[in-house]
Amino acid sequence: MIFVDSETVGLCGPAILLQYAENDNEITFYHFWKRSVQESLELIEWLMNYKDGLIFFNAVFDHFQLCKIYTMFLLAKNKDKVPDIEEMKSVEKEARDGPCLKPYSIFDVFLHARKTSFQSTMERKDIVVRRVPTTLAFQLCNELNKRIPLKDIYFARKKDRKRWEVVDTPQNEWKNVVLKFAASSGLKALAVDALGVPPEEILYYSDFDRGLPKVHELHYRPFGGNWPRIIQQYIDHWWEADREKNVAYKYAANDIIYLRELYKYFESPPMNDNDSVLACLVAAVRWKGYNLDIKKIHDLRKRLANLIREDPFDPNHIPSAPIQAKAYIAQAMEPAERIIFENNGSTKKVILKEIIEGDGPAAERAQNVVRVRDAKYKIMLLDKLLQAGRFHADLKIIGTLSGRMGGGSGKTGINPQGIPREKEIRECFTFATEGYTLCGGDEESFEVALAAAKYGDPGLTEVLSKCWKCGYQYKIGEFLLERCPECGEKDSRTKLHALYGMKLFPGMTYEEVRKDKGKYTRAKSCVFSKIYGGDWQTMVQKYGISEHEARMADYKFNQDYPEIEKARKKTQGMFQSMSQPEGLGTKVVWKEPVDKIESMLGFPRYFTLENMICKALFDLAEHIPSTWRDVKIPVTRKDRVQMVSGAVQSALFACAFNIQAQNMRAAENHTIQSTGAQITKSIQVEIWKHQPVGINPWIVAPLNVHDEIITPVKKGYEDLVKQTVLEKNESYRELISLICINWKIGLSDWGEK
């Protein structure tokens, strides 16, 4: 196998250096701009066809670089010479139309680490002990830092590496004690933590990059930028590093050494797991980009711009900035309502939605602000697409703890997961070019099908495969029929959302709930809330359901489908470390929770870190230091007078119970979301198998966004791809009896799917 890494001009500019080592052999430094174009092409072709496999750390980046440099060099007029910078600049944009690069065999150590206990280094929220009396806040902070041993890897991106910190609150008598994570799952952080490399021996790019000019680039437009003007300095820098064997050389060599050792540390896992394969797919597709309807984008942008009047003196101007929007909305409120809104309200979307649900001019103004903000967001997206001329989808292969894909490069990229679902936006994405057919689809009621499989309630599975009108029992091959074979009713398979809506809104029939868009949407939200660990209280707080109706709906649903509540309680019990058997306000009892849960297909979600912190908070709350108890200062916390030590104890328990509640919800969510992600990814990988290994013309270029897959398919392959999709989907039938994918051939755009 070959261990591969690259050094580049920025994140989108061309590769300068390729470091690689075959098995345990010496590391080779290959300088793309010092060797002939032909030599570079042959090297990359050798890598793509290397049967024992390529090992990367973050193949989404390095394979993108190989795709870009190969397709650029392929357009060089004289391949026997070193590449000419000006010529490469002129062909860079055109190079996107080059062939597809697909390695014969691939493994990504970075992605593998995210399936192990190192998953805890992914992005996570701060842990906050709220409303701690100022008198004891700093003592508590010191105590938590002593009691909870946390590895440096969780703070590797912080210069000060601080753990718990005291943070001010608006009330002087209270502080928050906060654990702010800044974890790194990078190669060097793993080398320190897993391989035991002394931190002082780690070299960083910042140790030697002084003097190299800054790169200006845009991730949504991975060509252009200022690389042609500055690349020569990068070429010289790495060439000198190789000859002098200096700090930069050691930095580049260490990346291969650490990569090789980490692969062994993880016990040399097998090649071509789905995530590694997808990393190379996403990289190749990102460079190529997807086709857009530029005229539709211009037309839509013009319509959206008409909604926005930027001149603040224009009488029809609607402000969108928080301060101005707040004043604009407040002007239309009644005096009492205005005081509350001005003092406590914000203009976040969730707050504006509450105002919109009311009556009167304030609701209208809130709706105006939402509409203008939405238009501005869409214009920003459209402008990026126009600048790039194509949709360069940027994705993280394991972007969440459930294993789902996530958005890639932040502010300067385009996150496919965040593209609005409205038809006016999605019809701008045509994807396929001449000679290709757009195909795609998504799973029908996927989360409901997964939930039914998870809960294992036969009654629920049976009712969801029936015609709501005549009771006809659909057979597996009939799930996509538009009409009931028995009574002819359109779209007649029973919808769980409408079924639940009948319980939420007593007196309404199934058909009435389906026709009432507002109530159906609220019922749908309540169903998803229940699937993902919510209860009747969630319905009251989030969706405006009365307490009586929420309680009754929940009770009746559990009566009809008892296995659901049993399954939920079983999962919750696995992660309920603390309880109060004698009731609220009595002694808290600890029980060891489990440290991980797996999806129905085996993807793990680890809770080791959360459980360890939760136990430390519990232990401290149970045994408050005596010196704290000696501080006889009363405070009022949540309408209850306590001594400061008692208030600290309450704050600790509250934080621990909050962590426990988050764990329980995450565990409940994981079994559904992660299973869905794995199925969608596996179908995407099966489609990708139609693309030949090595370097060849494009056959397929699948994109996975949430639970849907869309792909251009070379003409003549449409039926083969559809058969592949249906067969792969069917392979999960034994596990998920209601699984059914709606796959279409010959779409005109993304909106038609």
Image (cartoon, helix red, strand yellow):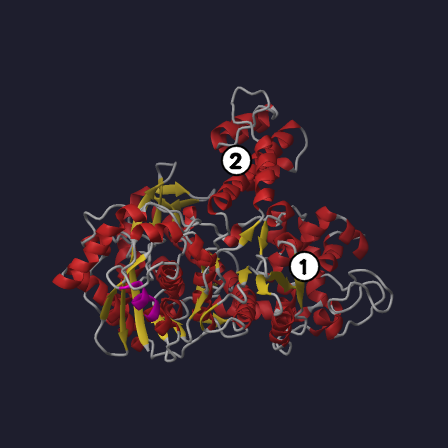
Q: Nearer the viewer, residue 231 or 705?
A: 231
Q: Residue furthest right?
A: 487
Question: What amino acid type is highlighted by mark number 1?
Answer: Asp
Q: Residue at x 23, y 53 (%)?
A: 234
Residue 664 visible from this viewpoint: yes
Q: Nearer the viewer, residue 424 or 80?
A: 80
Q: Which residues are magenta?
A: 36-42
Check if residue 39 falls in the magenta segment. yes
Q: Residue at x 75, y 68 (%)?
A: 463
Please tell me whether residue 378 is drawn above or below residue 711 in the rendered image.
above
> In the rendering, at what x and y percent does residue 396 appear?
44, 60
Q: Residue at x 39, y 54 (%)?
A: 652
Q: Which quarter of the rendering shows the C terminus?
A: bottom right
Residue 592 visible from this viewpoint: no
Q: Quadrant of residue 708?
A: bottom right
> In the rendering, at what x and y percent does residue 704 appear?
54, 61
Q: Is residue 395 left or right of residue 752?
A: left
Disc 2 vs disc 1: which is toward the camera? 2
Q: Residue at x 36, y 60 (%)?
A: 73
Please tell me whether residue 266 is drawn above or below residue 347 in the rendered image.
below
Residue topped by disc 2: 347
Question: What amino acid type is highlighted by mark number 2?
Answer: Thr
Residue topped by disc 1: 554
